[in-house]
Amino acid sequence: MALSWILLTLLALAVLGYFAGRSRALASAEGDARALHSLPSYYGYNVALTALVPALGLLILWLLVQPLIVNNTVSGMIPDTAIAEGSDRGLVMSEVRRVAYGLDGAIASGLLSEVQARNADADIEALTQSLKDAGQVLTQDISKPILLAAQKYRSMTSTGSTAMQIMVLVVALLGAAFAYIRTHREFRARNVVEQGILALLLLAASIAILTTVGIVLSMLFETMNFFQLHSWKDFFFGSTWAPNFRGGSELSILPLLWGTLYISVIALLVAVPIGLFAAIYLSEYATGATRSIAKPLLEILAGIPTIVYGLFALLTVGPALVSLFGDGGALGLGWMASSNAVLTAGLVMGIMLIPFVSSLSDDIINAVPQSMRDGSLGLGATKSETVRQVVLPAALPGIVGAILLAASRAIGETMIVVMAAGAIAKFSGNPFEAMTTITTRIVSQLTGDTDFASPETLVAFALGLTLFVITLGLNIFALYIVRKYREQYE
Amino acid sequence: MMNDMTRVERTVDSKAIKIAANNVQVHYGDTHAIKDVNVEIEDKTVTAFIGPSGCGKSTFLRCLNRMNDTIDICRVTGDILLDGEDIYDKRVDPVQLRAKVGMVFQKPNPFPKSIYDNVAYGPRIHGLAKNKAELDEIVEKSLRRGAIWDEVKDRLDAPGTGLSGGQQQRLCIARAVATEPEVLLMDEPCSALDPIATAQVEELIDDLRKRYSVVIVTHSMQQAARVSQKTAFFHLGNLVEFGETGQIFTNPEDPRTESYITGRIG
């Protein structure tokens, strides 16, 4: 019985339980729903949930635990002599699994009988041939220990899943029966369902948090692997980024961090004034009609995929900057050699961040009470004096928060810098030179043929974790500022 | 009602007319909020606007310093003369006008700045002080006039929003006074205050009368009777009756006024 059948059975049981619980509740109140503690449907939900939730929980747990147990047992069966030189237990185990699936496949296509597949003394060559005939992929000829292990693997898996099906159904039936017997007009089904809803919401929230923890942990382990292969002093305090897949790389984050911060600062220099002024116009000066058109238009910018911004940088902004600052350019300065430059990436990233800053700031400025503006206007201040001296100071904490959030987006941005900033890691203050950032280096270290045992690849995880810590720190700082000053005018 | 009116001495001798309104109409979109209002507000007098909620008294008050300009759908017609000059004339800058006609709002609205900066806000905008010493002087004088100096003189750098409700309102009055207005408009200044703070603000209003023309909108008839010399009764956008406070409360001419002050309509 496949997994989907178990799920369907459980669902059917829950639906049956719903109607059974509902009618039992009504019967206990002699058909008068007003005599019940809760609405009749709550009794139904109670039975359905009590049948469904523990059974599903058991199912998920079983599916997670069974492969672990089977793997452990089977891998214990493989003698050390069966592990070839240069290989390891993990590789042999995947061979075992392949053989086990191969046997399943061969049985399904009728080339082997169940008895033949289980025969421990089977002729190995014949078996290998029939597996190949069945179109199963084998990387090497099956050896005796591998066959035995595969057979054990199959039998344990099939026993396990039969046991699982029985247990899950028993738990579901027990749950339904328990809830059905408890159903009585005095029973507070509504409160129980409320608890169930709470548990559901809690589950959703904890999945989100646990995922974050999982991401951090996975990066943390790879980062620790990296630091075993490469000195952390070079990573944090070195001055050169020169990965070399033949070994002897210098992998320092500092030149990359410099490029990241430089580009982000330029982006913010573009985005913050323009975004903020746009927000002030929209919230303080624009009429309702203008606002209702201009605000969505501005927010369309936020919906453009960053790769499109990258194209814009590559095809339009970069060449335009070169024709201004480049050799023989309009200004005759000859400062800019190629369209790949910090300035190009920064400008385009700034444009990308404008709606981010303006939309958040607009909401924050709108949240400043009208009474503040009235108070200032009533004293004979002009509109811009009011904005500058009353509205903006009152909204400042929120605006700072918005800017910090924009900064953490700029630091994490990848596509625009890949396409517009170039790929040279160096310390330089010249905005017309190409530079590179942490995110683009992560991409380039992990694309192509990668060997997850070399520091040149693993450095990507260390870079990623550092980036994560930086943006997390910025976000926490932004939230702290926003919270700390939020209630100042209430 | 009568015994409330003994506190304020009633000066019946006429004074110069500060604000004269003729045939003022206000429309909010399609709503005719103020209908044909004529009123003369005297200098160095407290004039109270009373009437049931939604009768237009606050709307009319906001016409006197053109605060209604900030509302897009609001349209004002008719003449409002301040010292004989039409304030809705094109040559009049509403920003300058509001410096002359100050306003105190229903809910205390100190800026999220220090107490000092709250009071110094107007003088700084209008360049009333030549230097820091003069500004200090203006701030102290205004806070004294707002009857709050003694409470805040040791913490002028503390945020104005940290004061109690009554203190905040007196701070707002001090802030309005600091720009040296000629008329002070007060829109239900005590509605968010407790009785003690209300008494302090009322005392302050009576004191302000020596220098300014004060117009106060209030829901409390006792308050109108206590602080004002002239009272205007608004009903459904009409100015029903306007006259000496004593007269309005003891011997109203219009039956609607009598119904309102005796609590039968409103």
Image (tube, rainbow, N blue to C red):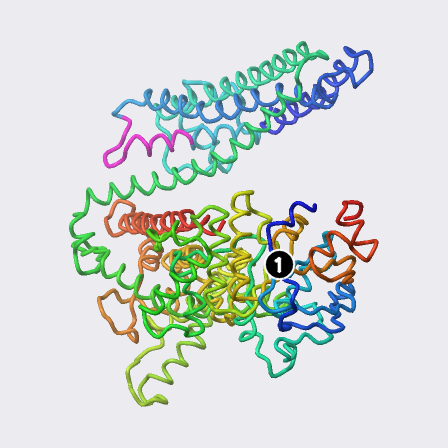
Image quarter of residue A242: bottom left
Residue type at mark 1 is: Ile
Image position, residue B262 (x, y; %): 77, 46
Q: Does the segment drawn in magenta span residue A95?
A: yes
Q: Residue at x 76, y 45 (%)?
A: B263
Answer left or right for A267 relative to A46.
Answer: left
Q: Residue at x 36, y 22 (%)?
A: A72
Image position, residue B131 (x, y; %): 32, 72
Residue placed most toward the observer, A283 or A193? A283
Image quarter of residue B140: bottom left
Tag 1, which chain? B
What count of labels does the image hold?
1
Q: Secondary structure at mark 1?
A: strand
Image position, residue A89 (x, y; %): 30, 30
Answer left or right for A454 relative to B233.
Answer: left
Considering the whole magenta stretch, tell me its main secondary structure. Answer: helix
Answer left or right for B258 relative to A279.
Answer: right
Residue placed most toward the observer, B32 or A283? B32
Residue placed most toward the observer, A135 or A158? A158
- Please report the bounds of the magenta region as a residue range: A82-97
Q: Is residue A328 above or below residue A87?
A: below
Name the quadrant of the N terminus of chain A: top right
Residue placed most toward the observer, A77 or B245? B245
Q: Is residue B58 above or below residue A80?
A: below
Q: Residues within 10 Å of mark 1 (few under 14, many from 20)?
A: many
Image position, residue B223 (x, y; %): 63, 50
Which residue is under mark 1? B216
